[in-house]
Image: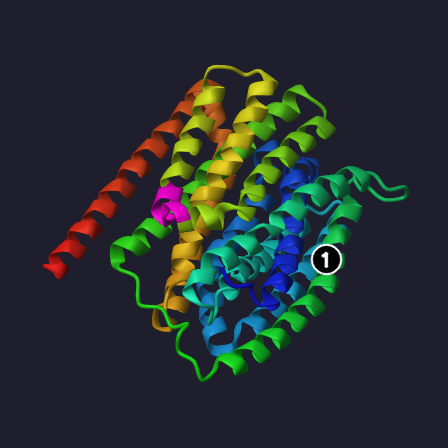
């Protein structure tokens, strides 16, 4: 396999900053929301608005990238991250709940732009390098998994500031570091693009409708199951253990989400993209099955690790398919894909607590298992339909 262009590694760093912000937000959003909300029922509203912002703007940002270029939109995202940090800081300083809601909405705008980093890595890239480039950018989450929980614990309390206030300032600090990284990425990418301008070998054929559906459904439901299971487990662990214990458990889960990125591209080349997606959903089923029979913390931690690996396989496989779109399909379908993912991630952010209250721990996990089984069957059906269509065309 050829080496990846240097600019891909700048996107890896950018993705690490993105996911540090995302992990910090999931660690503190509900706690801070509970502290400032006028009622407990509104405690997760700021975190929900973060995903709502992603849902409302992802397709818009994708269209703007086509007209203005990815770099301009990425820099706008940095500005949103900077504003989110400052707004969150003042929200805690002055105990203003609606300012906290604005902070997380702005953070959602940033994440909405940053979700395209993995696709930017594959722009004008040779087909055999796309799985490696996509997985490499996703692997930036390993840095986030190590750094974010440490930052959360270290800056939870800072003398002279309300609890968790300093964490919001970290968002602004990340924005100031991220902006020059993206500028250098853009310069390196331009040089690479000029070198390739006479070659059309990187142009990819269009994907079939069935294959696009496989990619969109896989990515969306993998994100939904992961979000629901992670938040339910986090709520359970925080109820029975300390903040530090729950943070370490989430850290192990996030590591499991991203460490497979270092080898998943090889699995995709060896097994095929769809086989890796199937493997991911089998692991997601297992992660739902384990905690259905026990509430012991050890088994919940094991299920969180299995959940992370399953998410990576399904999400990386889906992202590889979407990254392989040709120039005509790219921005429209990537925007649609990220919008659908944002929708299911939003549902995954709002629904865990109501599901847990309505169904209880065991039945909530069995419900997640049932959804995985149904999606798995749909993917198999789409794959067979695509093969039949290919055979019909060949004959």
Residue 285 position (above or below residue 159): above
Please state if 91 lies on the left or on the right of 298 as rendered: right
Residue 268 position (above or below residue 3): above
Q: Nearer the viewer, residue 27 or 32?
A: 27
Name the residue: 43% across, 80% down: 199
Quadrant of res 246: top right
Q: Nearer the viewer, residue 166 or 138?
A: 138
Q: Position of residue 200 (x, y in %)?
A: 39, 78
Name the residue: 49% across, 35% down: 228
Quickly name the residue at label 1. Answer: 174
Name the residue: 65% across, 64% down: 78
Determine the main secondary structure of the stretch shown in magenta: helix
Quadrant of res 15: bottom right
Q: Residue furthest right?
A: 159
Q: Is residue 387 visible?
A: yes
Name the residue: 61% across, 64% down: 77
Q: Which residues are magenta?
A: 270-277
Residue 118 position (above or below residue 24): below
Q: Is residue 350 visible?
A: no
């Amino acid at each position: 396999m050829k080496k990846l262009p240097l600019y891909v590694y700048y996107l890896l760093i950018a993705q690490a900053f993105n996911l540090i912000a995302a992990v910090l937000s999931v660690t503190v959003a509900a706690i801070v929301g509970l502290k400032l909300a006028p009622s407990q029922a509104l405690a997760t509203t700021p975190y929900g608005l973060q995903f709502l912002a992603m849902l409302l703007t992802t397709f818009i940002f994708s269209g703007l990238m086509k007209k203005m270029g990815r770099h301009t939109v990425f820099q706008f995202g940095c500005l949103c991250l900077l504003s989110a940090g400052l707004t969150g800081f003042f929200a805690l300083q002055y105990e203003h709940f609606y300012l906290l809601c604005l902070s997380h909405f702005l953070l959602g705008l940033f994440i909405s732009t940053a979700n395209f980093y993995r696709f930017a890595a594959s722009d004008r890239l040779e087909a055999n390098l796309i799985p490696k480039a996509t997985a490499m950018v996703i692997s930036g989450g390993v840095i986030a998994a190590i750094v974010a929980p440490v930052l959360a614990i270290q800056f939870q309390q800072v003398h002279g500031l309300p609890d968790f206030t300093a964490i919001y300032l970290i968002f602004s600090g990340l924005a100031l570091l991220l902006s020059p990284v993206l500028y250098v990425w853009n310069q390196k990418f331009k040089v690479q693009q000029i070198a390739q301008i006479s070659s059309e070998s990187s142009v990819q054929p269009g994907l079939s409708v069935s294959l696009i559906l496989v990619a969109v459904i896989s990515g969306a439901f993998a994100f939904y199951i992961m979000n629901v299971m992670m938040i339910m487990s986090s709520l359970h662990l925080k109820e029975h253990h300390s903040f530090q214990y729950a943070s370490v458990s989430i850290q192990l889960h996030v590591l499991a989400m991203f460490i497979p990125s270092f080898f998943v591209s090889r699995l995709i080349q060896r097994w095929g993209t769809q086989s890796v997606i199937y493997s991911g959903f089998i692991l997601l089923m297992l992660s739902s099955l384990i905690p259905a029979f026990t509430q012991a913390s050890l088994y919940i931690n094991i299920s969180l690790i299995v959940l992370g690996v399953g998410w990576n396989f399904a999400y990386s496989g889906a992202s590889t398919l979407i990254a392989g779109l040709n120039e005509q399909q790219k921005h429209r379908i990537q925007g649609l894909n990220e919008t659908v993912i944002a929708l299911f991630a939003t549902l995954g952010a709002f629904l865990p607590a109501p599901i847990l209250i309505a169904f209880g721990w065991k039945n909530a996990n069995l419900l997640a298992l049932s959804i995985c089984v149904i999606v798995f069957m749909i993917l198999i059906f789409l794959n067979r339909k695509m093969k039949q269509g290919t055979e019909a065309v060949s004959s």
